[in-house]
């Protein structure tokens, strides 16, 4: 059988990423594969700062390709992921030492509080994990750190053996950490901008996030320092804006879209939460706050519409019980609404990856390859 890319990719796809069940192809580690005649060349690229892992992967990848009958020369380049390209708005400010193993960081944001931003962030993260992405959730909403409750966590995080790094929780397949663990709840409301920025940076730097396909960040509401810090410190793959159908919430959502665009962060789309109420008795749908405003504004802003989530007591109860609906009853129509949003977010990330792969002649990342 003549050697071709598929054969080589299949062989490499049997090599596991050390310490994980995922293989090195689906986790985006193998890049720029070229097969010419009997010769094979590719690069192994992982997050910065883990030379031992790089060596192990190279050895095992080489052995896997060598085992293919008829293979000639094998050239493997290895590298830790280079610094992300700086965004136009914050030249030079990105910190390459932050989140070295994380492929995508996405912000979940809203113009104002109480629209269900945290609820969407939790269920989106659980949904992405359910769909197979290695997912993390960072609760950076200092003004309403409710996510530990929604994730069913009431203990404090542990430090690793060095005593310097924080071990994230693992719930519903999602690695999770909250700003709420670092600060006293009552003190949080009087925090000034620089303190917020420092705390967020600490969570990006000191938490053992490891290798992730996507880190979902629940942002504080509004368009303040936290948003700016995040967009300046790490390369955001995009922002998901959560709104309710009321005009006031929509007006705030528009401001959110404008802010992310100003700092050159793509808007992945708009989610309309508490979009309608499905009566548990008669099953009829009631548009409590008016409906369709999210889709309309998304169209007007030229941003994708990611879906609508109904107003339903089961969603709130899931949050209160520490069991997000997507994890608790994944086959329910309510969970499906969130899973649909997750799928559209994935599609948007895949599109971004495909574009980047075209620009750099690489293989793209996990989201684009699984499609
Ligand atoms: P935010 O993060 O925007 O402040 P939360 O996610 O904390 O909002 O939600 C505020 C309250 O509304 C919570 O009690 C939550 O359980 C509830 N909630 C959010 N979305 C829904 C929904 N679709 N249906 C029912 N209750 C919801």
Image (cartoon, rainbow, N blue to C red):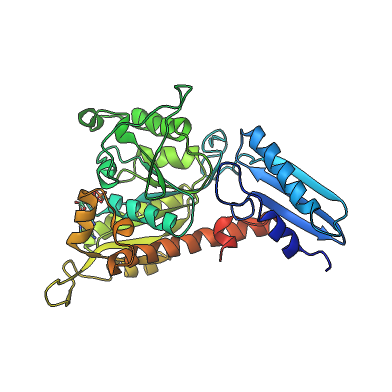
The percent coordinates of residue 321 (x first, y second) are 21, 49
Does residue 111 appear anywhere in the picture? no
Q: Nearer the viewer, residue 90 or 334?
A: 334
Q: Is residue 246 rendered to the left or right of residue 26?
A: left
Which residue is located at x 74 percent, y 63 percent? 7
In which image quadrant can residue 88 be found? top right
| Residue under the image location 67 percent in, 44 percent down | 45
Q: Position of residue 179 (x, y in %)?
A: 33, 35
Residue 278, given in percent of the width and then of the height, sits at 19, 71
Q: Is residue 100 visible?
A: yes
* Residue 183 vs residue 15, the one in the foreground: 15
Residue in view at x 61 percent, y 39 percent: 83
x and y percent of residue 192 in the render?
A: 30, 29
- 140 shown above or below 183: below
Farthest residue in the left direction? 281
**Relative to residue 321, is residue 271 drawn left or right?**
right
Quadrant where the image shows the N terminus: bottom right
Rendering quarter of residue 335: bottom left
In this view, the residue farthest toward the top is 163
Q: Is residue 79 above or below residue 302?
A: above
Quadrant position of residue 273: bottom left
Query: How many marks do you count on the picture?
Result: 0
């Amino acid at each position: 059988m003549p050697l071709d890319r598929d054969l080589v990719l299949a062989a490499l796809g049997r090599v596991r990423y050390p310490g994980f069940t995922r293989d090195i192809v689906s986790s985006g580690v193998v890049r720029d594969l070229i097969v010419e005649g009997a010769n094979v060349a590719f690069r192994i690229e992982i997050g910065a700062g883990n030379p031992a892992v790089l060596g192990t992967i190279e050895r095992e990848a080489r052995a896997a390709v060598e085992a293919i009958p008829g293979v000639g020369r094998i050239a493997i380049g290895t590298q830790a992921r280079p610094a992300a390209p700086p965004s136009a708005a914050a030249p030079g400010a990105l910190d390459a030492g932050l989140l070295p193993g994380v492929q995508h960081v996405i912000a979940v944001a809203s113009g104002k509080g109480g629209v269900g931003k945290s609820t969407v962030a939790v269920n989106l993260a659980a949904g992405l994990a359910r769909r197979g992405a290695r997912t993390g959730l960072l609760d950076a909403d200092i003004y309403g750190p409710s996510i530990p409750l929604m994730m069913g966590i009431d203990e404090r995080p542990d430090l690793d053996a060095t005593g310097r790094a924080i071990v994230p929780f693992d719930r519903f397949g999602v690695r999770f950490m909250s700003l709420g663990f670092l600060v006293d709840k009552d003190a949080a409301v009087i925090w000034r901008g620089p303190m917020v920025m420092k705390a967020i940076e600490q969570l990006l730097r000191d938490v053992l996030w490891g290798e992730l396909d996507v880190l979902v960040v629940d942002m504080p509401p509004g368009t303040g320092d936290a948003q700016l810090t995040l967009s300046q410190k790490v390369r955001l793959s995009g922002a998901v804006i959560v709104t309710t159908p009321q005009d006031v919430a929509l007006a705030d959502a528009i401001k959110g879209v404008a802010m992310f665009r100003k700092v050159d962060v793509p808007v992945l789309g708009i989610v309309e939460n508490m979009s309608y109420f499905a009566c548990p008795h008669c099953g009829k749908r009631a548009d409590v706050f008016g409906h369709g405003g999210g889709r309309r504004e998304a169209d007007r802003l030229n941003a994708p519409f990611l879906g609508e989530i109904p107003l339903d007591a089961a969603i709130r109860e899931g949050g209160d019980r520490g069991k997000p609906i997507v994890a608790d009853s994944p086959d329910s129509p309510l969970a499906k609404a969130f899973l649909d949003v997750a799928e559209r977010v994935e599609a948007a990330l895949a599109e971004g990856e495909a574009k980047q792969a075209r620009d750099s002649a690489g293989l793209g990342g996990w989201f684009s390859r699984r499609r």
